């Protein structure tokens, strides 16, 4: 299994890669805001990494209900399925952007926001959650 983690955003799409080893690593974000160029960049990442599964962050609220961006993500997922014919797994992305942003020094955050670094770190957290669910750590020997 070769997975592409995706943190969908209207301005940027964060990306991460993971495989059977079970470790998610960030990839450069898709910075194209819209249109075919955006889909082409996603297609390039899928082809270059020979992706078999897509893992998309789904925006739940803290109470477990679907977030206000859920409809936008659902439309994006429908287009992903139509264009790439790959399985898509939805993973709760609650607080992933916050965690990703918190991992960057406060004074550096403004400068890196437009680079997509925070988005790809969020995608890495999303994908790592998925990989951990699929392959939980082994229990220590008794």
Image: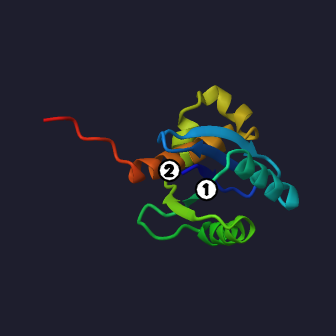
Q: Which residue is drawn at 52% across and 50% down?
A: 126
Disc number at residue 95?
A: 2
Percent coordinates x, y for residue 85 in the rendering: 68, 67
Name the image quarter holding the C terminus.
top left
140 shown above or below 133? above
Marker disc for residue 52: 1
Where residue 68 appears, x then y in whole percent?
59, 68
Q: In this view, does 62 lie to the left or right of 110?
A: left
Q: Taking 113 as reference, is 65 above or below it?
A: below
Q: Kindly report the distance in space between the C-alpha atoms of the residues bearing marks 2 and 1.
A: 26 Å
On the picture, is 28 further left or further right than 53? right
Query: Mark 1 falls on what kind of element?
Result: loop
Vertical relation: 104 (above or below) 37:
above
Q: Is residue 33 visible?
A: no
Q: Residue at x 67, y 72 (%)?
A: 78
Label 2: how many Cα within 10 Å (few below 14, some 14–19, many 20+) = some
47 over 101 or under it: above or below = below
Label 2 residue SS: loop
Q: Which of marks 2 and 1 is in front?
A: 1
Q: Nearer the viewer, residue 50 or 95?
A: 50
């Amino acid at each position: 299994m070769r997975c592409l983690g995706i943190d969908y955003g209207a301005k940027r799409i964060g990306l991460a890669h993971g495989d059977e080893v079970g470790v998610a690593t960030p990839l450069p974000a898709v910075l194209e805001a819209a249109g075919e160029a955006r889909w082409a960049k996603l297609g390039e990442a899928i082809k270059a990494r020979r992706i078999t599964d897509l893992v998309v962050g789904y925006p739940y609220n803290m109470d477990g209900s679907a977030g206000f961006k859920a409809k936008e993500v659902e439309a994006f997922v429908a287009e992903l399925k139509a264009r790439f014919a790959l399985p898509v797994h939805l993973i709760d992305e609650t607080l992933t952007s916050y965690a990703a942003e918190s991992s960057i020094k406060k004074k550096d955050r403004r400068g890196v926001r437009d680079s997509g670094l925070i988005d790809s770190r969020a995608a890495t957290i999303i994908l790592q959650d998925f990989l951990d669910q699929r392959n939980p750590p082994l229990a220590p020997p008794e």
